C-alpha cells in the first residue's frame, strides 16, 4: 500500500480529496478519521497538519504527501516535487499597516516582523540585505501589528481579505505557492509502481482540466483552414454532414488558446460551436 499524507482540515483538504476522487480513488473516511483506506486502490491516507507533512514524508511515515509549496520550502526537507497540482494557489507576502509609508523593501529595516515562515522570511531578508527582527508565531499572524506584537507580518495571502480586515497592505511577495505532491526517492518496487500509476492518473486529470473538447459545423470550402488552427490530439476528426457542403469537425483545444481559436473559427464561418469539458485525457 502506498501511504499518502493529506491535510487534515483547511484549504487543501477538499481539493486533495477531489483530486483523488477524479483519479478514481475514493477514501473511506466518512466520519473524518485520521487514517482511511481507499476503496479498490492500494492506498492509505493519513490526515495530518499541513506543516507536518514534509517531515512525515521525509521520515518515511508517509510515502508521499499533498502539501503547499510554502510549507515544503519552509521546512527545508529534501523532498521531490512529483507533480504540481494546480490548486491551493496563494502567495507568501509581507504586509504592513495601511497607514505606513512604504517605498521599497529597505523600509523593513529595523522592524519586527511576525510570521510562521521564519526560514523563508529570513532568506528574503538576507537576499535583500535587510536587517529586521523575526518574531515567530504559529497562527493569527495578521493581528500582530494591531496588538503591538510586531510592526509588519509575513503570511499567506489568497484573496487578500484577511489583510483588509486587519488594516494591512501587501507590500512584498516573497513566494508564489500551489499544492504539490511530494515524495522521497527510495520507495520499494511495489510502492514505486503504485506511485507511477497514481501519477499517470493525476497527469490525465490535469491534462483534461487544461483542455476542452470542441465540436462545430464548417462549410467544406473552409475545412482546410479550420483544420490548420485545430490541431486535435493527432489531427481534427472531420465527418461529412447530411447537408451537402458541410462537415462536422471535432477537436481538443488547450485553454490558453481557447478564446483566440474561437474567434478565428467564427471568422472562418464555423457554426454551432459546442464546447465540452474533458474528464480524463491520456496521451
Ligand atoms: C491563511 C493565511 C491567512 C489567510 C489568507 O490562513 O494564514 O490568514 O489564509 O487568506 P485570504 O487572503 O483569502 O484572506 P488559513 O485560513 O489557511 O488558516 P491558518 O492561518 O490557521 O493556517
Ligand atoms: Zn491564517
Image (cartoon, rainbow, N blue to C red):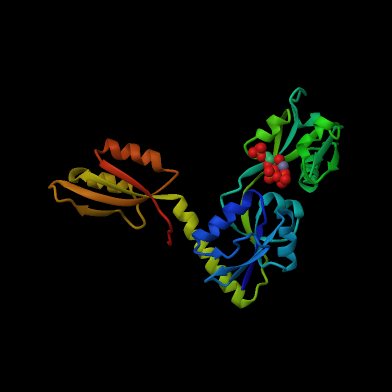
Q: Residue at x 53, y 64 (%)?
A: 25
Q: Position of residue 238 (x, y in %)?
A: 24, 53
Q: Is residue 220 left or right of residue 126?
A: left
Q: Is residue 205 left or right of residue 132?
A: left
Quarter of the figure with the N terminus: bottom right
When asked about the image quadrant of residue 176, the answer is top right
Q: Nearer the viewer, residue 92 or 34?
A: 34
Count of numbered labels shown in the rendering: 0
In the rendered image, is residue 157 in sight?
A: no
Question: In this rendering, is residue 245 above or below 76?
Answer: above
Q: Residue at x 43, y 58 (%)?
A: 280
Q: Position of residue 142 (x, y in %)?
A: 76, 36
Q: Residue at x 67, y 56 (%)?
A: 8
Q: Position of residue 115 (x, y in %)?
A: 79, 42
In the rendered image, is residue 82 in sight?
A: yes
Q: Nearer the viewer, residue 189 or 274?
A: 274
Q: Position of residue 253 (x, y in %)?
A: 38, 48
Amino acid at each position: 500500500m502506498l501511504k499518502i499524507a493529506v491535510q487534515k482540515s483547511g484549504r487543501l483538504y477538499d481539493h486533495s480529496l477531489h483530486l483523488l476522487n477524479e483519479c478514481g480513488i475514493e477514501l473511506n473516511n466518512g466520519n473524518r478519521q485520521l487514517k482511511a483506506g481507499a476503496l479498490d486502490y492500494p492506498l492509505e491516507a493519513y490526515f495530518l497538519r499541513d506543516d507536518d507533512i514534509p517531515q512525515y514524508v521525509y521520515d518515511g511515515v508517509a510515502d508521499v504527501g499533498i502539501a503547499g509549496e510554502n510549507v515544503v520550502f519552509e521546512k527545508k526537507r529534501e523532498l521531490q516535487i512529483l507533480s504540481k497540482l494546480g490548486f491551493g494557489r496563494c502567495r507568501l507576502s509581507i504586509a504592513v499597516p495601511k497607514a505606513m509609508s512604504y517605498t521599497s523593501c529597505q523600509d523593513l529595516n529595523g522592524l519586527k516582523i511576525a510570521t510562521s515562515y521564519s526560514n523563508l522570511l529570513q532568506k528574503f531578508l538576507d537576499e535583500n540585505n535587510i536587517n529586521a527582527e523575526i518574531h515567530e508565531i504559529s497562527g493569527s499572524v495578521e493581528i500582530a501589528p494591531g496588538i503591538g506584537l510586531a510592526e509588519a507580518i509575513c503570511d499567506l495571502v489568497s484573496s487578500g481579505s484577511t489583510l483588509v480586515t486587519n488594516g494591512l497592505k501587501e507590500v512584498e511577495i516573497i513566494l508564489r505557492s500551489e499544492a504539490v505532491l511530494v515524495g522521497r526517492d527510495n520507495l520499494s518496487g511495489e510502492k514505486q509502481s503504485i506511485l507511477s500509476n497514481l501519477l499517470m492518473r493525476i497527469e490525465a486529470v490535469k491534462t483534461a482540466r487544461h483542455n476542452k473538447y470542441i465540436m462545430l459545423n464548417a462549410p467544406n470550402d473552409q475545412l482546410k483552414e479550420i483544420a490548420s488552427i485545430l490541431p486535435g490530439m493527432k489531427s481534427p476528426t472531420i465527418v461529412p454532414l447530411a447537408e451537402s457542403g458541410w462537415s462536422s469537425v471535432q477537436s481538443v483545444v488547450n485553454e490558453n488558446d481557447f478564446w483566440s481559436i474561437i474567434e478565428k473559427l467564427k471568422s472562418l464561418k464555423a457554426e454551432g460551436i459546442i464546447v465540452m469539458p474533458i474528464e480524463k485525457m491520456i496521451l
